[in-house]
Amino acid sequence: MFETFSHVPAYPLALPVFWGAFALFALVVARRLKVFTAAGAVGPAGSTQVPRRIGGLVRYAFLQTRMFREVRVGVMHYVVFLGSTILLIGNINIVTGGLVQAVVGWPFAGILWTLAVAIQNLIAAAVLGLGVPYFLFRRLVGRPSRLELGRTGLQVLGMITLVVGTEFFAMAFEAAVHGDVAGALVTNLLAIPLHALDSGAAEVGFVALWWGHMAVLAVFLLFIPTNKHFHVYTSFVNVYLRKLAPRGQLPRLDIEDENATFGLRTLQDLGWKDLLDGFTCTECGRCEAACPAHATGKVLDPKRFIMGIRDMAEAAEITMDLIPNSPIVRQTYGLDGTTPATAAMTARIVDTAIPYEAVWDCVTCGACVEACPVLIEHVDKIVGLRRNLVLEDSRFPQELNSAFRNMEGVGNPWGQPPAGRTDWTKGLPFEVPTLAQLAASGRLGDLEVLYWVGCAAAFDERNRKVARAFATCLHAAGVNFAILGQEETCTGDPARRMGNDYVYQMLASANIETLDRYGMRQHTIVTACPHCFNTIGNEYGQLGGDFRIVHHSAYLRELIGNGRLQLDAGGGVATRAVTLHDSCYLARYNGVIAEPREVLGAVPGLELREMERNGRQSFCCGAGGGRMWMEETSGTRINAARTTQALATGATVVATECPFCMTMLKDGLAADASNAAGGVTALDISELLAESLAAPRGGRQLPVIH
Amino acid sequence: MRIVVLMKPVPDPVAASERLRPDGRLDRANAPAVVNPNDEYALEAALKLVEAHGGEVTLLTMAPAAAPETIRKALAMGAHRGVLVTDTALEGSCVHSTATVLAAALAQLEFDLVLFGVDSTDGGAGTVPAAVAAKRALPYLSAAGKIEPDPAAGTVRVRRMTPTGYDLLEAPMPALVVCTQALGEPRYPSLKGIMSARSKEVRTFSLADLGLDDGSVGGAAATTRLTGTSTPPARGAARIIKDAPAEAARQVVDYLVEKWIIQ
């Protein structure tokens, strides 16, 4: 029996040692899953969109693409990942009495097994020689701020070193005592100096290391579920079960369900996938480093929030027995250690896992979600907490009271009378008809595109100029467009992001009804507001409203591309440096990144200078998630931070593509001391384009209004 | 404690949808109605009082028949029930008439306190609370910045806000209190509140139910009559003074003196 390990003294004992530990490991994991069951039943259906899910698994878990955003860290992590995976094969072989070797070593006279040993040997050497020292250096000396120097991190590294090291050096001693191991290139070399030892000492070394490895393996197995290293198992599951709905689509909320808890209050309201997020978090802090609220000194720390959820789940877990009582004991003595204690399951998430202020610090920009290598979903949970605070407790920053009332009462967060929705069109040298006017005169059939103006462009002085510039572009291209005018209301995005799904659904339903009245499912809608764009495009479908909406950057690009929009040749135009501030809801949430750049590229005399954080990695202006209507009293201002980044490019124009970004950056530029002379201005991409429109046929110069 | 809060549906002042009918009266049918903002302060004060002392809040409204829609909004904030006095004969009521009807309605209700808002955004008379207090012979505590009832002693203390500070008033209950914004921001209704408001009781009284006859109140018995309406002249362009601070300040002062605003 166990011929493979006949040279290991007392080898058969290895089986109870390991499988005993494994049984305990299984009990620990089983107990954890009971908390998952006690949590909400809502979770992703892993059986849907399987090819897409598997694709994600390969991309994010096996190839770890997000880890390679920091190349050196990515490579080193991959070495350790590969090492662990391949060494796992060797370890499975050890604890199965040589089963793997028997199977793999059978064909081709054992070449495959020799090859496996060789790879394993090289990888182990790389882990010990490169991976471990690198990560140790990083934690102790390099110390990026997102990593906290904690005992766990060092313990995990220590465990990895021990488990790989003992096996590696055991093989060296094995070679010294029993002759070269086929394929073990590195350890066979290391064995050469060991030949000098007397054979008894070498044998002692081998036995001590081999059994040391066995013991460490058992301890490591039990150590893994107690800390962040658990991600080696959970990240695969978490990645497979990731959110596949559009990133900008918040979970549906049934506001008619009288018995439901609205939003997230306790562990019971979280879905089991949310708990899995907690146990997948590796505390790497990439979310924290990407978070604009955290960067400006606010309370919010997305990493601590996810860790807090895990801590709550663990607190619930330890209220249960590791080994459940038998049904007889349960019935006879009334002892039931099989369900988590009610107190642990009904503790409030707000003020346990996350401070109340932090819930409202979030700009819902999604930088944390974008940064997470294991696809943890932070934003949906934070909005879930807001939903509960707003819909059940009416507990929210006081400024929101008027924003909510205004949206509810007059359909826009500014509290402006709806009659003023068309004021921005006054003085334009062409007519901007409403759908109602087109329908009344039977011209609805000629409509090419509906321009969804949005509240900001309708009521905010600065953004009205953007609406005028965009309408000027549409008119110059001869586009037959119309607006809804007084019939338009807020899409509900701010209400939804602030947790008030009741007001959101009220506004959204009204808009869907209005759009349907004019048959707008058959038409394209264009908007210059990424928030309107995201909500109509990604969220109205949940309420039965399926519309085709494009952002004005994409629409303008098309008008330039097909030659409908003629631009000035640009002879003699002085070159201006421009930087583009990507909107979170456009670039990160919806991947619209190339379109605005192509529009800028078409404008003569512009030289684009990118900020360090652009595209999907953009840094929020500070107005998302309803923060537009809240005071920013904690820490420094997010828009000031972004303004500094923009000014660092040396550009004289900060191009925007979102009315909120426009407001925030305009204010940021006005308040920045280094721009006291006002030389740097914020302009929407449509304004930059409108400035360069060619004189239309007939030679009449189109006025562009600023 | 049993508290009655007077609540009037008014056209949403933010929507700027107030329109006059050809007869010069407000076109209530075509304007979205909201709870009169000053009444919300009274309701908030009442809700805080019952949270602290126990008890129930009843809304009392005199309005056209469509009012329950608005009453539900106030019920969503946490009031327990609503009472609506509605009768076609009440159209065109003057202050005197309104006070008579509300006093008659209060006679049907049991209460320790009656809370009013300072005035309504549509009528703006601000005299109804005093008239009701007089008609029902209730202690009249106006401009309340703080309300401290002592249910055991059957008294209430009110801080009456004055330009220089406050007066401390004490009166036996039942009493009538006029509430100011100093009592605190009205709460935002929770979704649970909105849902439970759907099933709360709203009782309706006609004039006959209150023992009043058509001729004694309402438009027929109005003591004031609308004789005409006119739109105020559009405001001229604002004068903007742009100068060095000292010079600009001098010009502002000169202007205010010229207009007899300061001396």
Image: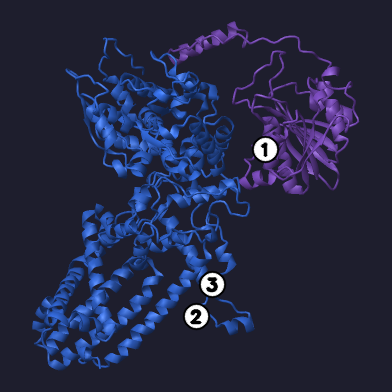
Identity of the amino acid at label 1? Lys
Residue designated by label 1: B73
Query: How far apart are the alpha carbons under marks 3 and 1?
Result: 44 Å
Disc number at residue A323? 2
Task: Give the image's coloring scheme.
Answer: by chain
Q: Is residue B61 above or below residue B201?
A: above
Q: Chain of mark 1?
A: B
Identity of the amino acid at label 3? Thr
> Measured from the top left, where is residue B216 in percent x and y?
89, 22
* Chain A, chosen colour in render: blue
Q: Chain of mark 3?
A: A
Q: Is residue A412 above or below residue A257?
A: above
Res. A437 visible in picture: yes
Identity of the amino acid at label 2? Ile
Residue designated by label 3: A319
Quarter in which the N terminus of chain A is drawn: bottom left
Q: Residue at x 37, y 44 (%)?
A: A589
